[in-house]
Amino acid sequence: MKKLLLPIVLLASLNVYSQVGIQTSTPQKTLHVNGSLQVVNEVNVGGNATTAGSSGTSGQILTSQGPGIAPAWQTLNTVSGSVNGAMYVQGLGEATATAGQTIDVPGVTLDITVPAGRTQTLLFTILGYALDITTGSTSQGVFTLLQNGTKISSAYVSKAGIFPNSTQSNLSVTVNIPAFNNNYTFPIVRSFTGLVNMPVPVTFLKSVTLSAGTYTFKVQYAAWAGTAKVNVNPDTFSGYNLDKECMLTKMQVLVYNN
């Protein structure tokens, strides 16, 4: 009886550590299934000989961690290439810049945190107006996007004060009137009407890839020529319909996982 038990024990030990194939005689892994697989309950990944693996939570997906590492459950907004989130801010209150002056655009500041152990790519879209609707003058300037106080992108913006409003030419015509035996010269006046205080808004994009940490982004306006306002309240326009949002500076950020 003892002689019979020893070969059985040895054979059982050998089977425990061998590869098992289902519908295949050449299994490539510890368990190799050549066919479909139906799981009625949970799927557990990771763990060890004494601890069960994770079954994840509702809505998570199973992602590969590479060779020799157990797959991991992840929420969709942490998967590489997916959009992690979107953020949006817009201006709060008017601010004026004179020629040569640089100002922060009120309200257009945003703190963004990249989680530990990860990198993310941020795509910025900036929309800006700069004008002074009370003077009729022309202005020029630049909107700038800063990361922790350092410029990372900028775009030129202008406003045509009179485009045009009225103009008198220096043309004239001379007419001879025989009855008076003289020539008379008459100026030719041409009048034009057009847009006044025509703003030329600017939209610009910027992409940055960041490692873990917290970053502060803000938009500034630098006046090159003339005086201009940002976040203008258009309540002096005739027919104004109380839309205070239309001329606010805006910043939208899409965050992508890497």
Image (spheres, rainbow, N blue to C red):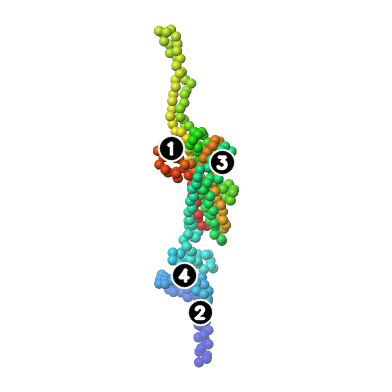
The reply to whether dot 2 and dot 3 touch (C-beta < 8 Å) is: no
- Measuring 52% from the left and 80% from the top, which residue is drawn there? 14
- Counting the numbered discs, the total is 4
Where residue 105 appears, x then y in whole percent?
A: 53, 45
Per the image, the residue denoted by label 2 is 16
Disc 4 residue crowd, few under 14, some 14–19, many 20+, Cα 10 Å: some
* Amino acid at the residue labelled 3: Ala
How far apart are labels 2 and 3 at the CA level? 74 Å
- Measuring 53% from the left and 84% from the top, which residue is drawn there? 10
How far apart are labels 1 and 3 at the CA level? 25 Å
* Amino acid at the residue labelled 2: Val
* Amino acid at the residue labelled 1: Phe
Q: Earlier in the sequence, mark 2 or mark 3?
A: 2
- Measuring 45% from the left and 14% from the top, which residue is drawn there? 185
Per the image, the residue denoted by label 4 is 55
Per the image, the residue denoted by label 1 is 237
User: Which mark lies nearer to you, 2 or 3?
Assistant: 3
| Vertical order, 42 against 92 (above or below) | below
Per the image, the residue denoted by label 3 is 222
Disc 3 residue crowd, few under 14, some 14–19, many 20+, Cα 10 Å: many
How far apart are labels 4 and 3 at the CA level? 55 Å
